[in-house]
Amino acid sequence: MVDDYSEYDLMGEVARMYYYDELTQDKIGEILGLSRQKVWRILKRAKEEGIVQIRVEGSSRVDSEIEDALREDFGLKEVEVARVFATEEKLVVKKVAQLAASYLKEKVEPYISLGVAYGRTLFEMTNFLPDNPVMGLRVIQIMGGYGKLKGEVMAVELARKIAEAFQGDVVYLLAPAFAQDPQAKEAIENQEKIKRVMDLAKTVDIALVGIGGVSPVSTLMDTGEIYPQEREELLREGAVGNICGNFYDIEGNQVESSADKRRISISLEDLKKIPVVIGVAGGKSKLEPILGALRGKLINVLITDELTARDLVKKD
């Protein structure tokens, strides 16, 4: 019987079954009469108590020198830089996404609110999130949905998958990222449910955002949410990137356009008031968008790849 074990013995037995016998958490629970969640908590505590000690030679992150340089140059709270072993952008994005999942797992705490915006790398990140129950977590969508992106999922699906991984609640912003016209935006934002979600979005503890560009293949442009004349307007005004559908130049100054009159999301000013804003992006095409976001203090935590990181330090 499990009740006959001391707590220490139980942690040791569960750890042996998981790491040595390579049994799944479900199978261990079945054998010992425990829920899967209980097995996960025991394994977590076994690591915390030093019963399980994991040593991996080498690291998935670069030397701290480049992280320290970025942190100091741009006044960031934290920097995580992924080592990459290929320059193909698709593979770089996957490596950044995997590191972002690992970082988020360590930073999410009970009873906090996590705001989420859409981005290709953020969606890729959800493929690497382990089941990690966090009591009282609330995931809030902080910008409207882009709709479907080449057959992939809607923006609301990103928030759902993150909430599911942490077994938290999710609050959807059931609106488009950009309304059809200013009149439609006003009508949508005047709905009581939308107002409540937007109020919650402005007061989250942590915001997790993608950093987009203005090239035709960037996520936002690729969806067709931005009209061709609006993109031309943005380029004329020097826009290099966007966060939550808000565009900015290479110095991080907001670039206003007629698209703002249709946008349904938190503003850059709202974003700057959030205590922790994690920007996740990597690859050659994201250099200028990231640089502008850093110079404008639009994020205070950066997760990127080593190639982009080194270029950022050179640019600065």
Image (spheres, helix red, strand yellow):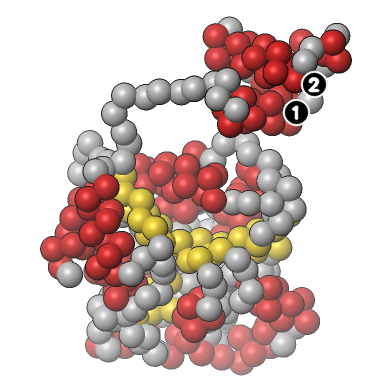
Residue 220, image quadrant: bottom left
Q: Pick the quarter of the image with the C terminus.
A: bottom left
Q: Mark 2 — residue?
A: 34
Mark 1 surroundings within 10 Å by alpha-carbon count, few (fewer than 14), some (14 through 19), many (20 or more):
few
Q: Amino acid at mark 2?
A: Leu
Is disc 1 in contact with disc 2, using a CB cutoff of under 8 Å? yes
- Say which residue appears at 41% left-offset and 67% top-offset: 300
Up the image or down, 166 lies above or below 271; here it is above
Residue 308, image quadrant: bottom left
Q: Amino acid at mark 1?
A: Lys
Q: Could you say which is closer to the camera, residue 125 or residue 134?
A: 134
- Say which residue appears at 37% left-offset and 43% top-offset: 94
**Mark linked to residue 38:** 1
Q: Pick the quarter of the image with the N terminus.
A: top right
Dot 1: element: helix
158 on left or right of 54: right
251 on left or right of 141: left
- Say which residue appears at 23% left-offset and 59% top-offset: 69
Coordinates of residue 55 in the picture (x, y in percent) = 40, 23
Dot 2: element: loop
Q: Could you say which is closer to the camera, residue 72 or residue 37?
A: 72
- Say which residue appears at 37% left-offset and 75% top-offset: 297
Coordinates of residue 3 in the picture (x, y in percent) = 86, 15
Mark 2 surroundings within 10 Å by alpha-carbon count, few (fewer than 14), some (14 through 19), many (20 or more):
some
Would residue 40 be visible to someone looking at this image?
no
